Amino acid sequence: MNREYTKMRHDLGKKNVVNGHSKWGQNFRSFAVITLFILGIVLGIALISAAFLSFPFEVSVNIFTWKTTGDVILTALWGISGVVAIWTLFGSFSKIKRGWIQHILLLYNQTVFVATLIPLFVLGAPATVFGVQRVIDNTYLFYYLTAAFLSAGFLCTLFAIQDAIEKSNWWVFIASIPYIMTGWMVSREYGAYNHFVKSEAFRFDEVVPKLKEQGVTALVWNETWFHLFAILLLILVLLLGGILVAITWKKTASWRQGKEKV
């Protein structure tokens, strides 16, 4: 009896040691994949940034005129940001298991992307009194609808990640961060725009000639529109990184887990 008991304890101890080494090896391999991927992302961003900074292209005040190479690049990236988000949500990449952070970014991206479509309806408005008034009305509509879209997008996000919220209420706070920051920006810039348009210094007989002289439309006053473009480009980088992380994590699953030892 004592011999059997001693042998059983020896076998269990040996198995625990083997399992401990196996677990340590899996953790190390996972850490190695994450570290190498982070270094790759940092290096990739650095190389892309250096390439953009060294590339001699100009950007027009209205990038949708496509007068320069920079206009074409930025509008292409703007369109890609919307396509990538839709494709990731409903296309072939939807088969890849996404983290909650990526899900939040996807819905936030679509909220911002839809908001950027509103000023396109007055993109060709001429630098006349009538054209300027059209742009002003459209810009007010842009601010109101952007606030509505942000509210709706936040509610949709909470609905989409309700499984995560059931595990921890902190996900409500995490999901609200991009919407709170964007809402604060929209509110602040709406106040500045409203003050500018309704100030006594704003006169159509003065601003119209200046717009004609500069060859631009009154859309240049809508700073929020351009800021949303910048947000979309940032989200695009994060979304592509998230897709690469998901693919890499899936491809390295067998190597990270190692062979099962008994």
Image: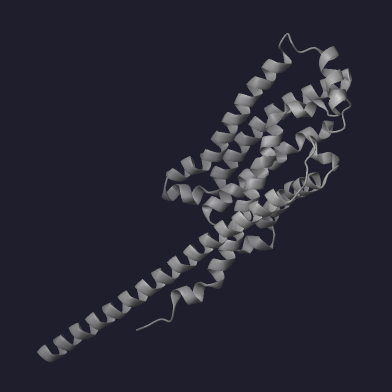
Front residue (pair 99, 78)? 78
Residue at 76% across / 34% down in the picture? Answer: 118
Q: Quadrant of residue 213?
A: top right
Say left or right for 126 vs 192: right
> Is residue 81 depicted above or below 30 in this figure?
above
Residue at figure coordinates x 62%, y 35% from the top left: 150
Name the spot of residue 78 as percent of width and height, x first: 73, 46
**Residue for point 83% across, 20% down:** 210
Please give left or right for residue 121 compared with residue 245 in the image. Answer: right
Q: Position of residue 217 (x, y in %)?
A: 83, 28
In the rendered image, residue 131, in percent from the top left (x then y), is placed at: 87, 23
In the rendered image, is residue 97 in sight?
no
- Camera-side residue: 142 or 189? 189
**Residue, far left:** 2
Query: Is the N terminus in the top left, top right, bottom left or bottom right quadrant?
Result: bottom left
Q: Is residue 228 above or below residue 74?
A: above
Query: Where residue 15 appears, x then y in whole percent?
Result: 28, 81
| 162 versus 91 height, above or below | above
- Res 62 visible: yes
Residue found at the far top of this picture: 200
Q: Nearer the viewer, residue 59 or 257?
A: 59
Q: Is residue 88 above or below residue 168?
A: below
